[in-house]
Structure formats: structure tokens, C-alpha cells
């Protein structure tokens, strides 16, 4: 990053406000306190004025710390800890009422903001991730949580702890900033290219905005403008007849697929969620499950290896959802057919740039992010009928391919998912199956991409792994260990050793006991502030931090969540075991990881993935 920046964090309590700032990429750290015991408000105001216009980086900066800093500057630094605490509580409470009320427009900010929370889309409920969780994922030596509740009036000792805690959070945020540098620089390049502020945009927002820019360049109006600002143009549909979404030429020969298609065409829905509850068909013992997220199915607990009599083929539709729209002229009604023309332009433009370039990544986001936005109540792409056209026809067209492939001798479907499938076939019939795939491409005007596996390991529909002929590995579900920041990174040694066992024939226990990275054994548990964690042994319960790193150990403590009572028994707190039947070693400070690992636990977990291979 070319410009100087600061990584910041704040803490707010009724009688204490802290702001910690570290010059990014250095150890230079500033701590400012406004409390019952110290008033550094003038020093903080002077500091923030000196760095006015520079970049500040935070975690949830746009949603929390930024508005606090903005209030402090607007009041000329003449504030008390109580004023800052009231503002903090108002921000938190507004999340249920009007989460935009406390937002500060970029034009009103005294500094350039970069919010790592927003860049990674952690403000999405499904991807929500705390800084404490990231401290675990980043394998920091120390994971720290507040030992006293929000709203506590702090004494000197607690404020001293809070200062250290806030510095630790800045160190964690700074470490995460380093991990996100590629994403930040990507957004800088896009901001310059499009003359839009992408610095705090997640990938989906970037993609939809680029699509909007290109539509507007073609004269397509996406917003209405009035006294209250702009509002997105949308096509809202109180009801949708699914027959209007399904391509009229689709038909099947298989009675099971035909019954499913007839049922779909008879349905009238009022919302897109919950459309496909328990909708499935079974053909030749294979269950095909339909859902808003796409078609899914798999055999269970099979290990398949290619040999002289078995070929394992994989076919995926190239950019399935974008090309469904382009080829079939599906578009949000209020945007018109020009939408499809621009979609095609985006798809073609992406192919003109090499993978790894900002342009290729930007156009990929533009192509892939639009489907989700078509069901977003705040988006100018909203049209639930468009959503249903994509997801319904995507599944049905894949079923047409499956139906015809099942006519080819020796074909056995092993896995199908949103945009593709895997099957086994005798080498003598490979060309027959390929001719079916070519026929399907001609009928649908879509393109299939083909690769082959050497081995395929399938536990169930959500958990499988395959080794392609070039040696690269595809992992799904429990077999994944190269995970996104928001995913569960607990006990990665299980997936890693299971892969060694399945792919390389390694022995489980010997491999496990020789595993070099102790962090791969670590797990994380979290409870909300209304609950607490305890470690229990013969001496009683020992309180633990609400976010807790641990590993299963010989000796140690039993881990329990102490949860509030339920309505049916309002006086009895619930005691729920974590890793029931096993003892653990809590180690938020990695120096506490002194007990021997209980390898039996990890062997049991690995056994669940290796499908009987020992």
C-alpha cells in the first residue's frame, strides 16, 4: 500500500473510552484514554487532526468504531466517556431497528476508512465472523476476550487490563490487514479504474456495481430519483406461477422426472424461500434432491478408483448461471433484454484478460454475483421470477443430461451438484457418453467442461473428495482444509490426515502421532455473552473465556456450556457438554498447551472420513 495508514480499535464502557492506533506495518502504537481517572481527549483530538485525510483501517470500522470517531471529531473532542458509551449503545441497539441510522457518508469522514469486516462480507449473517474467531484462524499465540461484561463501571485495574486488551485487538487487526492486502489493493485498482469507491465493498457488491455501471453505460436506468434520494427499480411479485419460470420445451422420458416436472409446473408460490422442501426423486437407487441452491445427490460411502475397466468422468457447465441467462434471454423484467446483452459483454470481456488480473477478477465477480442480487430486496436486480428461472431451469436441464446419460451402457451417476456431475463408465462407452454431452450442449446452447478422476472418495452428498488425473484434488465438506476465513477451522488435522490415508495410503495413528503442526489439533468453541464456558474437574468448575481454544488431551478438564434457562423450565440453567466423554486442554494462551494429545479422539474422527480404509 503506497499511502501511510493506521490500524485502529476502540473500547467503550460507561466510565472509560479507549482508542488505540498503530501505524500500519510498524510497532509504533498510540493509546488514548478518556476515563474517570484520565482525560486525554485533547491529545486524541489533536492526534486525529494531524492524521486527517489519511487512511484508518479497522474491523467493523464502518459499523461501529468509525461513527464513534466521527462523533468525537464533530464535538471537537469535548466529550466524556459517558457520551461515547451512549453513542456505542445506540449503534448496537440500532442494528435491530435502523442499522443505517448511524452510518457516516464517505464525504463526511475526516479520514479514509477501510473496513476489513466489510471487505470480507462478515456483515452478512451467513458469513458473520468475529475478531476473536479470526485470532483462532490466524493461529495467534494469544486469544483474548473481555473478562467483564459490557456496561461495567471499571476500576483502575480493569482499565489497565482493557488497555492491554485493546492493544491486543489492534495487533490482531493489523495481522488480518496483512492477510487482506491483496483484497485491499484489488479494491484500490478497481476504484481507480471505475472512479467509484470500492474500498469497503465485498465481492458481491463489487460484482453487482460493475454490472450496474455497464448497464447504465448502455442507457438502462436502474434507479428512481426523488426527494428521498435514489430508490432501486425493481420487479416485485406477490405470487409466482412456476410454470412461467420453466422453459416450455423441457420434458422427460423417465416417469420420476416427469412427475417432478408436472408438480413444479402446478405450483404457485408467494416467496422463493422454502420452495423445495423435501423435493426429490430416486432413479436406479440414486436420489436427486432439488433445492433453491441447485440439484444435489451422491452415492454414500464409496471409494472408486479408475482402472482398465472403469473411467471416472466429471462434467461441469461453464459459468452455468450467467450463461443460462444469456442463452435463454432471462432478465429482470424492469431492466429489459439489454440486461442479457450486457451480461454477454461481461462474460466475453472476462475471457480477454488473464487469470490473476484485476480485470479478470472484476468481470468474474460481475458475472457471478448477479443471480443472488436478483432475490435481494435492496437491489436494482430484484425480480424473483428471474431467480426462479435460473435455479429451476438449471436443475431441470441438468436432469435432461442425466436422463440421457443413463441410457449409455455402464454409466453410473456418482455425484451431481449445482452445475455438474460425476459418473463412472466402461472405456468402451466413453465416446457414446461424450456424444450425449455434445448433444446436450447443442440443445441448451451451453458449454460443458470435462476432466477425469483417478480416484473418488464419497462419504455422502455433502462430503467427498476426488483426485484428478493431473494429481490436483477436489475437496468438499468435511474433507476441506483450505478454508475461507468464516469457515470452521477446528481440528484441521482430521481432514489433512484423512487425505493422506486415502490418497497416499498412510497409516492413521502413525501419521497422526508424527504430525508436525500442533495448531492443526486445535478447536474453538464460542458462547454468547448471555452464557459462559467452564472447565470441570474433581475440584469443580473453572471459568473460561467465552471464546475458547482447546485440544482434546489426556487429563485436563471436561468442557461445558452454561446456557440460560428455557421458557419451559425458567429457573434451571442448562449445562451442555462440549466433546462429551473427552477431556480437553484449554489454551487461549498457547503456552498452556502442555498436556499430551489424546490421539484416540482424533483417530475416531478420522475413521469417519476414511470409509473403512485403515
Image: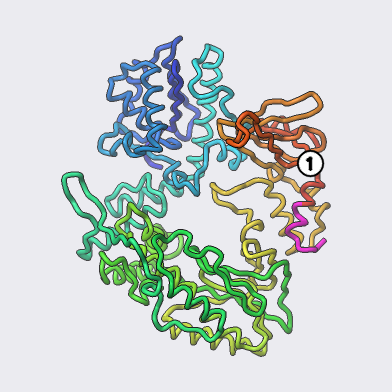
Q: In which quarter of the image is residue 284?
A: bottom right
> Where 541 falls versus 297 (above or below)?
above
User: Which element type, helix, strand or loop, lies under badge 1?
Assistant: loop
Residue extending furthest top? 37
Q: Identify the residue at image location x=43%, y=11%.
A: 38
Q: Is the magenta stretch mostly helix, strand or loop?
A: loop
Query: Where residue 550 sits in the image (x, y, percent)?
Result: 70, 37
Query: Where residue 28 sits in the image (x, y, percent)?
Result: 47, 26
Quadrant where the N terminus sits is top left
**Would residue 606 be counted in the magenta stretch?**
yes
Residue 463 as seen in the image, left or right of residue 48: right
Q: Label 1: which residue?
A: 581
Q: Identify the residue at image location x=27%, y=71%.
A: 337
Quadrant where the C terminus sits is bottom right
Query: Where residue 404 sits in the image (x, y, percent)?
Result: 55, 85
Colour basis: rainbow
Crowding around mark 1 (Cα neighbors within 10 Å: few <14, some 14 to 19, many 20+) is few
Residue 236 as seen in the image, left or right of residue 226: right
Q: Quick check: can you spot residue 362?
A: no
Query: Where residue 25 sits in the image (x, y, percent)?
Result: 47, 35
Residue 122 as seen in the image, left or right of residue 479: left
Q: In which quarter of the image is residue 368?
A: bottom left
> Where 397 falls versus 104 (above or below)?
below
Q: Identify the residue at image location x=39%, y=40%.
A: 114
Which region of the structure is painted magenta? 605-614
Residue extending furthest front? 568
Amino acid at each position: 500500500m503506497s499511502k501511510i495508514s493506521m490500524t485502529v480499535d476502540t473500547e467503550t464502557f460507561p466510565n472509560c473510552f479507549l482508542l488505540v492506533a498503530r501505524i500500519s506495518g510498524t510497532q509504533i502504537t498510540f493509546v488514548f484514554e478518556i476515563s474517570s481517572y484520565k482525560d486525554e481527549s485533547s491529545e486524541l483530538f489533536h492526534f486525529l487532526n494531524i492524521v486527517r485525510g489519511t487512511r484508518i483501517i479497522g474491523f467493523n470500522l464502518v459499523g461501529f468504531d468509525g461513527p464513534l470517531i466521527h462523533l468525537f471529531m464533530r464535538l471537537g473532542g469535548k466529550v466524556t466517556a459517558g457520551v461515547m458509551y451512549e453513542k456505542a449503545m445506540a449503534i448496537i441497539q440500532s442494528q435491530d431497528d435502523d442499522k443505517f441510522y448511524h452510518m457516516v457518508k464517505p464525504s463526511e469522514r475526516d479520514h479514509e476508512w477501510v473496513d476489513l469486516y466489510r471487505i470480507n462480507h462478515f456483515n452478512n449473517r451467513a458469513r458473520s465472523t468475529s475478531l476473536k474467531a479470526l485470532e483462532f484462524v490466524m493461529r495467534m499465540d494469544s486469544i483474548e476476550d473481555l473478562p467483564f461484561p459490557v456496561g461495567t463501571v471499571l476500576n483502575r485495574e480493569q482499565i489497565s487490563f482493557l488497555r492491554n486488551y485493546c492493544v491486543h485487538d489492534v495487533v490482531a487487526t493489523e495481522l488480518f490487514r496483512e492477510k487482506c492486502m491483496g483484497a485491499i489493493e484489488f479494491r484500490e485498482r478497481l476504484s481507480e479504474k471505475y472512479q467509484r469507491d470500492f474500498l469497503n465493498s465485498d465481492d458481491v457488491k463489487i460484482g453487482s456495481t460493475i454490472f450496474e455501471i455497464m448497464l447504465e453505460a448502455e442507457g438502462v436506468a436502474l434507479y428512481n430519483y426523488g426527494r428521498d434520494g435514489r430508490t432501486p427499480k425493481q420487479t416485485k411479485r406477490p405470487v409466482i406461477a412456476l410454470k412461467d419460470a420453466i422453459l416450455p420445451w423441457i420434458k422427460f422420458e423417465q416417469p420420476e422426472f416427469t412427475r417432478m416436472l408436472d408438480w413444479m409446473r402446478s405450483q404457485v408460490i408467494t416467496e422463493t424461500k422454502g420452495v423445495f422442501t423435501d423435493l426429490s426423486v430416486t432413479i436406479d437407487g440414486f436420489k436427486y434432491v432439488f433445492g433453491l441452491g441447485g440439484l444435489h445427490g451422491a452415492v454414500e460411502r464409496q471409494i472408486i478408483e479408475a482402472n482398465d475397466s472403469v473411467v471416472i468422468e466429471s462434467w461441469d457447465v461453464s459459468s452455468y448461471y450467467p450463461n443460462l441467462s444469456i442463452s435463454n434471454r432471462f432478465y429482470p423484467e424492469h431492466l429489459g433484454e439489454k440486461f442479457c446483452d450486457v451480461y454477454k459483454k461481461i462474460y466475453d470481456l472476462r475471457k480477454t484478460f488473464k487469470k490473476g488480473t484485476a480485470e479478470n477478477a472484476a468481470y468474474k465477480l460481475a458475472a457471478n454475483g448477479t443471480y443472488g442480487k436478483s432475490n435481494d430486496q435492496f437491489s436494482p436486480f430484484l425480480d424473483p421470477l428471474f431467480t426462479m428461472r435460473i435455479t429451476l431451469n438449471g436443475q431441470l436441464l441438468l436432469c435432461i443430461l442425466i436422463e440421457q446419460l443413463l441410457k449409455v451402457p455402464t454409466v453410473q451417476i456418482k455425484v451431481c451438484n449445482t452445475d455438474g456431475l460425476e459418473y463412472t463408465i466402461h472405456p468402451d462407452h466413453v465416446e457414446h457418453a461424450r456424444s450425449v454431452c455434445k448433444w446436450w450442449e447443442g440443445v441448451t446452447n451451453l458449454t460443458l467442461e470435462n476432466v477425469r478422476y483417478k480416484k473418488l472418495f464419497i462419504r455422502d452428498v455433502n462430503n467427498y473428495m476426488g483426485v484428478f488425473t493431473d494429481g490436483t484434488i477436489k475437496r468438499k465438506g468435511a474433507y476441506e482444509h483450505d478454508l475461507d476465513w468464516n469457515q470452521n477451522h477446528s481440528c484441521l488435522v482430521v481432514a489433512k490426515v484423512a487425505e493422506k490415508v486415502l490418497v497416499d495410503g498412510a497409516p492413521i495413528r502413525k501419521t497422526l502421532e508424527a504430525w508436525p503442526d500442533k495448531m492443526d489439533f486445535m478447536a474453538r468453541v464460542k458462547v454468547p455473552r448471555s452464557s459462559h464456558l467452564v472447565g470441570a474437574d474433581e475440584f469443580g468448575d473453572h471459568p473460561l473465556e467465552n471464546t475458547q481454544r482447546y485440544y482434546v488431551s489426556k487429563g485436563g478438564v471436561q468442557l461445558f456450556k452454561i446456557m440460560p434457562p428455557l421458557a419451559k423450565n425458567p429457573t434451571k440453567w442448562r449445562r451442555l457438554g462440549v466433546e462429551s466423554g473427552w477431556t480437553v486442554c484449554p489454551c487461549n494462551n498457547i503456552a498452556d498447551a502442555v498436556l499430551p494429545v489424546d490421539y484416540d479422539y482424533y483417530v475416531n474422527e478420522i475413521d469417519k472420513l476414511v470409509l473403512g480404509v485403515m
